[in-house]
Each structure stands twice: as structure tokens, then as C-alpha cells.
Image: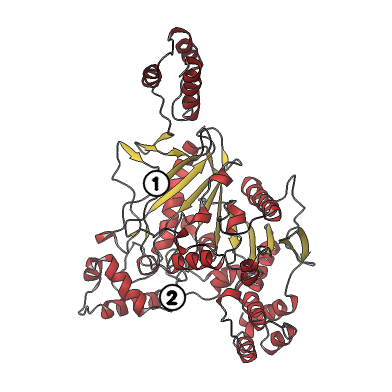
Amino acid sequence: MRSTDLISLFMCVCLSCRHSVKLPRSKLIDIDLIIPVRKLASLFVLLVLTGCDPSPAVTVNGEVLAGKYVEPGGVAAFLGVPFAEPPVGELRWRAPQSLQSGLERRDASEFAAACMQSMRILDWYRYMAETFGASADYYADLKISEDCLYLNLWTPTLDDNAKLPVMVWIHGGSNRSGWSYENNYRGHVLARQGVVVVTVAYRQGVFGFLSHPELSGDEPVANFGLWDLIASLQWIRKNVETFGGDPDRVTLFGESAGGENILALMFAEQAAGLFHRGILQSTAGYGLSMPTLETEQQRGADLASALGLSGAETLAPLRLVPADKLLDVYEDTFADYYHSPAIDGQLLTGSTWENIQARKFADHEMIVGSNDHEWFDFIPKGASSDDVVLTASNHPRIGGDKALAIVAGETDRRRAIDRLVTADRFVCPSQNTAAHRTASGGNAWMYFFTRVREDEAGASLGAFHGAEYSYVFGVHDAYMTTNETDLELTAAMQKYWINFAATGNPNGDGVPDWPQFKASHFEVQELGDSVLTIPAIEPEMCASFEAWNAAQR
């Protein structure tokens, strides 16, 4: 190898680690002048002399985190970073505890295990791969553990004076499954455009959204998954400057149950000041009903019975049950239970929906929206006209028989059912939330995602629940047809999301104007084959929803 090649290689390596080693320019010049690089061994001598390490490293809370570059000299990734002690043993069903088990040097180059859960989300991903003609093996097996309170961070700079906006992703999955590093949640593409991206884990299902009659006192008694999110935000506020982020510009964005959790935290005193903006994707209707602490405690008592535990005290024995057994019994016993945050009297003193109607918002700016075919893929292919009638009658909030008349022109019965459910659970509650946010003097924008992949599989799914992930993160699965229209929509959505994280307003150069969702003419931004402003959708069903909602107060 020529000496000039070695010098170039050396400089390339040193540039790739420019954030982890602060080497004076004069020192580089001196080395270049006084050491002849003629052999490969000389390169290693130089690396030793300069302390140059090809991986990014930072010191956080007294320990060195050794990450990796996603691409040479590009975005630095720190993966599997703990933000609390493992919630195991006596810490099961307790608030997340501050991390005490520091290391001199921690490998942060690989993702940690996901939180304990069934494989329902993994199975859904594998179903999606097969629908698009790929192998289910496209998605690797998921490693799960009760020791799961870790976060992942991507940053384009480790300059602690950079003050970049911070975007924190809260994954969905009905609060019983999902993980922080699903393929479409990788943050390197977003980070490359000038933001710090963080994805966080939180306890799921029986481990994160349960209570027990013996839980009482000053410590949290429920909503442990939400307490995990608060702990992660506290870690971010304390440490994100080290990664180039601005702790005073933190945006939470999340989908489905993740968005529901963000909405709940907007009204939680303990989360005040930890984040400043929220992007709620396909979520608002989930907050319409929330369990009480009493119902959560009863479920804990019922779980003890299902495990054969009896007597006056069952909490301690429950904490001794192996995590996999606890999960299996719980999933069998409460297979149909939906894990909304609970009104626990500590973190959440009232329901999210009541707080929205009372306009008890803080200063959070908000983007909220939904997809065109949220429910389509969950509807059996053999749906009948009777199923359409039954669906309408089961959804009085959007008008019942009136809603049935609105979808009467749909020739596809599945599409008729989908419109009804999407309006009831997503579109109309989202419009209500955005309207109350702006009516209270705040700022809110609303979107409607309509893009369908241009192939047979895409047409069979529509703009499904979760379809927008790929566009927000700019990470498109290889098995999906992705053309120029998809790439243009990706660029537009990322600009909107990043603009919002940076300034509290999605508008800026290079994207069509997006008006706020305000009376007297409510407008939304369609994100689809084109990006343009349209009137609020499903106006008749949403008018019925508003009438129903007013009658409840």
C-alpha cells in the first residue's frame, strides 16, 4: 500500500471519529510532517498516538457510551442505552428507579431486548412481508426480557453546543406489544437532516399497565409504562445536550397507543417541562374511555387467582413468578383487554378526553391526524351487508343509521365498514382534539394520510393503520414498492415533522402551506399522491360525533 493511501486512510478514520476524540489541528499537522507513513504498521502507531477510535464515544453519568456510526463520518448511533434500573424482582410494578449500575465503558452499538410481550406485532410484520410477496423471515425473531428499560439515539453531531431539536418516538402496539427499534423506527435518516432522534422502550401489558390491591402509598400504583416514559424523558432532558440536542425543544411523536400515551402525558403534572410538542398519529379516539384504579387493581387480583395464588397477600408471590409464565397466563386470561392508561389519582387525575373537552392543555403545540383505511385490513374479506348495518348500529357516536346512509354508496362492504370505524375511532376524535386545541388559543394542525403503494398488495391494504411510519422515518422496507411519488411524499412529511420539532410550526421552505385546524372552516393537509389542503373529511359523521359528545357533558 502506498504511503499516500495510508495517510488518506488514517485521515478518514480520524475524521470518522472526530466527535469522540478532540484532537488539535496542530497535532495533526505535526504528525503528518514528522512521521513517514510507509507501512501498514505505521498507521496503527498513529492511531495509538492520537487515541483515535473509529466509533463515537461520549461520557454520560460517569460512564463511557461507545456507539457506532451508521455510515462513515455520518450519523452516530447509541443503541441499548439504559435509562433506569432493570424493573425485575422487587422492582416489578414499581416506579422506574434511577440507574445505579454504571460501567466504566458500555457498549452501545446494539439494540437491547424488547420488553416482555406476545409476538402479535412481530406476526403482523411477517404477515405484511408475505402480503407483499416476501418471506416472513425478512423479520428476525424478537428477543424479549423484563430487563428492557433502554433507549436508542441517533445524532448527526456530538457538539454539545449544537442545540438541535429532539424528536422522541413512542411506539404503539395497544400498550401490550411493540418495541422501540422496529424496522421502520430507525432514526438515522431523520437525524441526518439535523435533529436528534430518540426511540424509547416502556413496559407493556401485565408489566406496565396493571395494578394490585396491595399497591398503595406514596409510590406509583399504576401506569408503570407511563412512568417509564417519564423516566426516559428525564434522562433525555439531563443528557441530550451531550448528543447535540436541545433539552428545551423536545417533541414527542407516536402512533396508535403511543400517541394515546403522549396525549395522556400532556395533562400529567409530572411530565411538565419534559417535552414541548406532540405529534399524534392515528390515535385520538383511544382516549375516549379509560379504566379506573379500582378496575386495574381488580385485574391484578384476578391475575393472582388465575395463577393459583390465594390468601390475604398475593403481590409478593406475583413478583416471584417467572416473567415468561406471568406473560403466558396473563395473555390467556385477558386476551381481549385493551390497555389504556388508567385514572390512578397520581399521574392521571382525570380522563384524557375530559381534559381535552375542558381545554386543560398546557403550551404544547400539536399535529394530529389519521390514515384513510385505518380499519380496512382488520375486516374479514367476506364481510356482508348485514355486517355493515351492524357496524353502523354499534357506532351511535357517528350517527348510527345516519352514518349507514352516508356509506350506502360504497360498493365494497369492507370499505363501508372501514369508513365507519375510521371515522368513529380516529378521524372525528382527532378533529375534536385539534379544534379544542386551537379554540383554547393554542396551535394545532391536522393531516389525513392517503398514500397507497402502487402494486397489488398495496391496493389490497389501502392506507392502512401504520402505513405512514415509513414516510415519517424515511425507512422503506425493501419488499414494498417505493417509487418517486413515495420518495417525494417522504421528503415532504419529514420536512413538516422536522419543521414542527424545530419551531412549533410545520410550515417552511420547500413544502406546501399547511393551515391550522381552526373554525370557521376546518382544513386538513392531505398527505398522499399529492400534498395539498382539503376540507375536513367525513363532515356529516363528525357533526354527529360532536352532537353526541356535547350531549355527554
Q: Residue furthest right?
A: 521
Which residue corresponds to the image point at 34% horizontal and 49% vertical from the top-left?
98
Find residue 39 and report its image quarter: top left
**x%, y% of residue 78?**
44, 42
Amino acid type at circle 1 is: Glu
Q: Of residues 132 and 15, which is closer to you in this image?
A: 132
Q: From the viewer's perspective, is 154 left or right of 141?
A: right
Find residue 478 and report its image quarter: bottom right
State the residue position of label 2.
292
Q: Are marks 2 and 1 in contact (CB under 8 Å)?
A: no
Can you see residue 364?
Answer: no
Q: Of residues 32 and 319, which is closer to you in this image?
A: 32
Q: In this view, does 74 lie above or below 204?
A: above
Secondary element at tag 1: loop
Mark 2, other Cα within 10 Å: few <14 / some 14–19 / many ≥20: some
Secondary element at tag 2: loop
**x%, y% of residue 35?**
42, 10
Q: Residue furthest front?
A: 1
State the residue position of label 1.
110
Q: Of residues 433 and 114, which is closer to you in this image?
A: 114
Quadrant in the picture for the N terminus: top left
Amino acid type at circle 2 is: Thr
**x%, y% of residue 155?**
52, 40
